[in-house]
Image (cartoon, grey):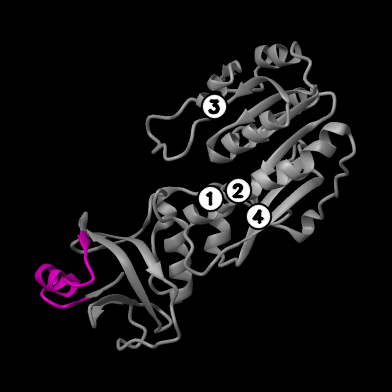
Amino acid sequence: MSRAVVFAYHNVGVRCLSVLLAHGVDVVRVVTHADSPTETIWFDSVAELAARHDIPVITPEDPNDPTIVAELAALQPDFFFSFYYRLMLKAPLLALPKHGAFNMHGSLLPKYRGRVPVNWAVIHGERETGASLHRMLEKPDAGGILAQQAVPILPDDTAFEVFNKITLAAEMALDRILPDLLAGRAVATEQNLAAGSYFGARRAEDGRIDWNQPAAMVHNLIRAVAPPYPGAFSDTAKGRLKVLRSLHPTNEIGPYGGRPTLFVRSGHLYAECGDGRLLRLLAVELQGLPLTECSAGDQINALFGTPALSLP
């Protein structure tokens, strides 16, 4: 029976740990994160799953601390697996498992290496992404690929909806390759990093909308940071406008000549963007209060003295 140490967090961590257990892998330690009180926890708990299976769990601030390295070395693992664990594993750790360390990444590598790959893929209007199991190196997301599973991104999918697809894709990819990996038959395909891309982390401030951009780009930002992420927003003279959901824009040209404007027509709420095209807004808050499609015109008129709101 293969012995593994699993570094895991989030829904991908839960589902991929479940795959290992289903295949009879002896998971001798789970390394995860303590949930932060400043973060909205909308995802499943790796620690709870490990507890149900009586697997010892640790939550070190730095897994590369020499005491943690020594603790894991004493377990004599055959494999390390990293499933949406948020910290980098350095060379002393990666050298421990007899048969290598493997990471599940939420993109079709070598595209979207680095942080929050699902959100970046949606921002860039990709129509496909997926999950990739690859060998871990010190350079992030750069090792040879053992398995991939693609999923579609539909034009109105939010990052949350795509992430749910990625979770299933990760489970499928791991379940498919794991028997060969455990038996030593899996072959990795080296990545051409020059053909891919690397992206960093995102902050809540990165959700600020530039309404002068084309409607398609504004739509992609809105769905990339829609709840449970912090949401897209812009600040007006009367308070913060927060856009939680929009509908993929058509080629319809608006009435304001490309001047960014929020308005109501036929009971629907629209924003005209910098390219003159209309973006229908399905869920909006102004000053923390919801603007409903049927009453948004009256609400805007009451707040601003006009049924249309110029956008910054």
Inter-mark Cα distance, 2 to 3: 17 Å
> CB of mark 4 within 8 Å of CB of mark 1?
no
- Badge 3 marks a residue whose secondary structure is helix
Residue 275 placed where, x, y %?
43, 82
Inter-mark Cα distance, 3 to 1: 18 Å
Point out which mark residue 130 bears: 4
Inter-mark Cα distance, 4 to 2: 9 Å
For mark 2, does the 10 Å Cα neighbourhood hold few (<14), some (14 to 19), or many (20 or more) residues?
Answer: some
For mark 1, does the 10 Å Cα neighbourhood hold few (<14), some (14 to 19), or many (20 or more) residues?
Answer: few
Type of residue at label 4? Gly
Foreground residue among 150 and 58: 150
Residue 84 is at least partly visible in this image:
no
> CB of mark 3 within 8 Å of CB of mark 1?
no
Q: Earlier in the sequence, mark 2 or mark 3?
A: 3
Point out which mark residue 311 bears: none
Point out which mark residue 164 bears: 1
- Badge 2 marks a residue whose secondary structure is helix
First to last magenta residue range: 290-308
Q: Which residue is mark 3?
A: 49
Type of residue at label 3? Leu
Q: Residue at x 40, y 79 (%)?
A: 274
Name the image quarter holding the C terminus.
bottom left
Q: Residue at x 66, y 22 (%)?
A: 64
Inter-mark Cα distance, 4 to 3: 24 Å
Q: Earlier in the sequence, mark 3 or mark 1?
A: 3
> Residue 299 magenta-drawn?
yes
